[in-house]
Amino acid sequence: MRPRALFISDLHLRGADDPRAALFRRFLDEAAARAESGADGKTGAAVALYILGDLFHYWLERGDRIIPAHAAIVADLAAATRRGLAVRLLSGNRDFLYGEYLTRAAGVELLGERAEIELGGKHVLLTHGDTFYTRDRGYRFWRRVVRSLPARLAARTLPFGFVAFAAERFSRGSAAARARKPPSAFVIDEAALLAEFARGIDVIICGHIHQAERRTLALPPAAPGGATRSGELWVLGAWSAGESGAGSAAEGGAEQLSRRTVEQEKDSAPPAQLRSPVHLLTCSPGVPAPRGGYVEFDGREFALRELG
């Protein structure tokens, strides 16, 4: 039996009235149906959903208390896990204050900031991806501040309502700051990718920049005279309400998870030389079609798919 996996990121859910929440509910329902009957209706193949950060626009919990608007989304997650869907959640740059609530209330497995898994004989790194964008110095400073011990202590001890108010204000300010960033802030650090591939990673799946992208890299030999190998990078698009992908599906109804596979090979860019001894074999950066999409491992290979 081949394991099957779905990968999503950057839903930025605010509450049950968010159009993306309705789409997420449909997504969970079909993923859970796959888990119950197998993707082909016969095999009963294990299905896991990996959420690579920023599921929520921001997250707070204190004991059994959470943001009230998030309760319905937690209930949707719980309904899916009860049907046999394994839901595994990584923290993002907005929802990094997870405690034990989602595990208790919804059966969600928390994986922290990064995780490594084996799929189809490949060693796969899962992470939100924000640490790969090292040119965004403003964000790197902000990340250190909000993850610092004083900030975490404040989130745990200050009045819950005040912390929620501050988080909402910070999130709005972050969106405005993002719009002012130069394009260089969203260019991935190739050296950071190389460091992961050099230690044996075959596939990296991440999100963060809200634009879907797929690259296949020809990597240098591990030893002089050795064989070259390839590494794959999959960047997940954001689920943006009112746009293509998730937004249009939310309005028109998403009845099938995998309407079509996003074109990968025929729209590839020609080989190009990057910094360091890495050759770009295929690339489809900033693909507009899969905004709101997901990556699927079907038991044999990875594919970028869209929801609508």
Image: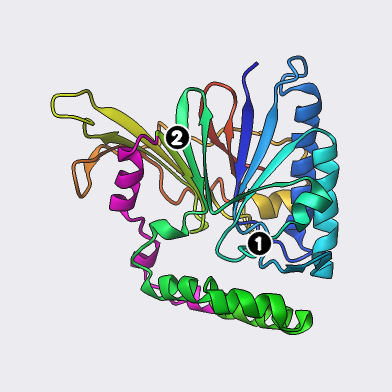
* Front in this rendered view, residue 8 or 270: 8
Dot 1 lies on which element? loop
Amino acid on which the number 1 mark rests in the picture = His
Which dot, 1 or 2, sits closer to the camera?
Answer: 1
Q: Quadrant of the C terminus?
A: top right
Residue 305 at x, y percent in the picture? 58, 38
Q: Nearer the viewer, residue 17 or 107?
A: 107
Query: Does 241 lie within the magenta span?
Result: no
Residue 171, image x, y percentages: 61, 75
The amino acid sitting under disc 2 is: Gln
Whether residue 222 sits left or right of residue 192 in the image: it is left
Q: Is residue 264 above or below residue 140?
A: above
Residue 213 higher or lower than 2, as above or below: below
Task: Give x and y (percent) for residue 182.
Answer: 37, 72
Residue under label 1? 12
Give the camera-side residue of 62 and 256. 62
Magenta residue check for 189: yes
Residue at figure coordinates x 45%, y 27% from the top left: 122
Q: Secondary structure at mark 2?
A: loop
The first of marks 1 and 2 along the sequence is 1
**In which image quadrant can residue 49 be found?**
top right
Report the side of 95 relative to 304 (left or right): right
**Does residue 28 appear to the left or right of 282 in the view shown?**
right
- Could you tell me if residue 308 is visible in this image? no
Q: Residues within 10 Å of mark 2 (few under 14, many from 20)?
A: some
Looking at the image, which is closer to me, 151 or 235?
Answer: 151
Q: Position of residue 110 (x, y in %)?
A: 66, 49
Q: Which residues are magenta?
A: 176-201
Give the label on residue 264, or none: 2
Figure disc tally? 2
- State the residue at coordinates (60%, 25%): 298
Asked if the residue under mark 2 is in contact with the one under mark 1, i.e. CB atoms within 8 Å, the reply is no
